[in-house]
Structures are given as C-alpha cells and as structure tokens.
Image: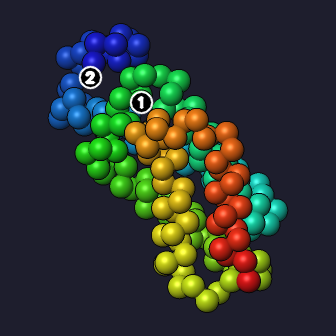
Amino acid sequence: MSDLAKAIGFSKAYIYKFFESKQAIGEMICANCLHEIETEVIASVAAAPTPPEKLRRLFKSAVEASLRLFFEDRKLYEIASSAATQRWDSVTTYEERMQVLVRKVIQEGRLSGDFERKTPLDEATLSIYLVLRPYLHPLLLSYSFDYTEGAPGHLASLALRSLAP
C-alpha cells in the first residue's frame, strides 16, 4: 500500500478514505488491469477481416496482453493471482466478457459460413473459452510460460478445425 500511495503522490491514509479495505483497492487495480487486457484483445479481434482470423487474433492477443501485464510487474502479478484464486468479482466479470467475445466470433463465423452450426452455441463457446482459459489465468499462465510462443497459434488452429463446416 505504501508503494501505491508513494507512486501516485498521496498518503496511505488518504487512499483508504476512498476504499473500504486493502482488498477493495486490489479489486480496483485488478479490474483496471483486466480491462486493459480486454480492450487490447477487442481491438485486435475487431481489426481482423474474417471470423477465422478473429479467432486466431483473440488467442494471440489475449496471451500476449496477459503475459505483458501479469509479468512486467511482480506486484500486479500477485494481485492478479490473488484475485483469480479468490474469484473476485472483477475476475468473474472479465471471464464472462471474454466468453461473450468468443461467442460473438463464433456467431459471426456461423453467419458467414466459416463455422459449423451443429454444435450448440453455448457448448462451442464454453469449449473454446476453456481451451483459452489457461492463458488468461495468471497462475495457470505461469505454469504454461514455456508454451506461450507457439501455443496460441496451435490452440487457435485446433479450435478452428473443430468449428469447420
């Protein structure tokens, strides 16, 4: 807390006037960090011309943004790990929004004829999200660090094959 107060030029006591607890401060920091990742992923997906490319970019940009944010600052990593382990609201909200993004890409692919339509949308969405999830979760990501360079492409290709018409 002292580091945070010092970094933004306020006293610790002044910061606590605006938050109920140290966890509330952590939740706000976590929510902002996750929003930063989500914004980067959405921009990358939106720039892709086709649904298959959108899915590839979703995997790649989610992993890159998560790695950059979680591992460039040890304290942010600790907050993110704690948030993910304790299932803070900011984390569950982030996970829900990422699933919505996966769903939108699948729906767009189905409408364009790029993706199959047999599998129920909820099932396809959850399955692809679960493949991506280890690369969004800070603790799981730390165990998968050796695979972060090639995994997004391989996993996106696997997901795309499962969605092929």
Looking at the image, the residue that sits furthest to the right is 49
Q: Nearer the viewer, mark 1 or mark 2?
A: 1
Q: Quadrant of the C terminus?
A: bottom right
Q: Residues within 10 Å of mark 1 (few under 14, many from 20)?
A: many
Residue designated by label 2: 15
- Could you say which is closer to the camera, residue 89 or residue 109? 109
Instruction: Please give left or right for residue 51 compared with residue 6 in the image.
Output: right
Q: Residues within 10 Å of mark 2 (few under 14, many from 20)?
A: some
Residue designated by label 1: 77
Q: Residue visible at 70% across and 52% down?
A: 153
Q: Residue visible at 20% across and 17% down?
A: 13
Note whether residue 35 is visible: no
Image quadrant in which you'd find residue 161? bottom right
Place of residue 85 in the rendered image (x, y in percent of width and height, measured from the top left) = 29, 44
Amino acid type indicated by mark 2: Ile
Place of residue 142 in the rendered image (x, y in percent of width and height, measured from the top left) = 47, 35
Q: Residue visible at 21% across and 25% down?
A: 16
**Mark pair 1, 2: CA separation:** 21 Å
Place of residue 11 in the rendered image (x, y in percent of width and height, measured from the top left) = 27, 12
Amino acid type indicated by mark 1: Tyr
Instruction: Please give left or right for residue 79 compared with residue 98 in the image.
Output: left
